[in-house]
Image (cartoon, rainbow, N blue to C red):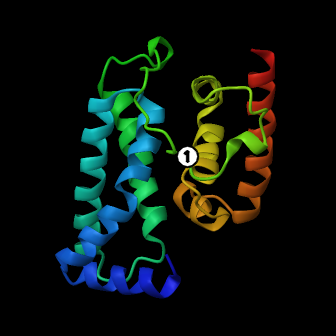
Amino acid sequence: MTNWSEKKLSRNIARGDEKSFARVYDLYVNKLYKFVFLKTNSREAAEEIVQDVFMKFWKFALNNGKDIKSISAVLYKIARHLVIDYYRSSSVDKAFFQLEENILPDGIYGKDIAKDIDTEYDLKEVEQAISILPEQYQNIIIMKYIDDLTNKEIAEALDKEEGNIRVLAHRALIALKKIVLKN
């Protein structure tokens, strides 16, 4: 999405335009679902959290009183906080989650992670490897290589400097490669 169209959508949403909100929903619902699902490994939790993300975004946009600089950064920041709340408020133990089979449809990934990891590894192994990474690396890998966000958008979503994201993305890829090659 271009900066101009994002600014226009942001402005329209702040004025209560439901069509602009629906456009944002259509653009981001699948990306946010993937992001949340990879964090929770639960269809139900991911669906509920994504629904809450958009409700909170709508309220935020209406109450903010000014244009949102990066819609994606705000959405991912809300999603990240809701996932944290999900783990805080439930007795869910992330270590005991098993990846569900055939949850994610084919072609779900944006950039081809296989160029950085040997193509012989299937997506399940990559998903499991991602789940082993520290949360910060998980967030960056998912946002950058699966959801195709820019370093700037990731930096805004994670409250970090853009240069720091480049370094962390590089380190996250190295850590991911080590896990995949080890298994």
Position of residue 116 measured from the top left corner of the image (x, y, whole percent): 78, 42
10 Å crowding of disc 1: few (<14), some (14-19), many (20+):
some
User: Which residue is rendered at x = 40% and y = 29% of the image?
Assistant: 103
Q: Which residue is mark 1?
A: 109
Residue 181 place in picture, x, y as percent: 80, 22
**Label 1 SS:** loop
Task: Give the quadrant of the C terminus.
Answer: top right
Q: Is residue 119 left or right of residue 5?
A: right
Above or below, comparing residue 183 to residue 60 in the picture:
above
Residue beneath the point at 43% across and 35% down: 104
For image coordinates 80% across by 16% down, the residue present is 182
Quarter-of-image position of residue 67: bottom left
Q: Is residue 64 above or below residue 125?
A: below
The amino acid on which the numbered mark 1 sits, given as a three-letter code, is: Tyr
> Can you tell which quarter of the image residue 118 is in?
top right
In this rendering, the count of numbered labels is: 1
Task: Indicate the position of residue 159 as horizontal and vertical percent values.
Answer: 57, 58
Give the quarter of the image for residue 124: top right
In this orientation, which residue lies closer to the viewer: 50 or 80?
50
| Residue 120 in the image, given as x and y percentages of width and height | 74, 26
Q: Is residue 16 left or right of residue 127?
A: left
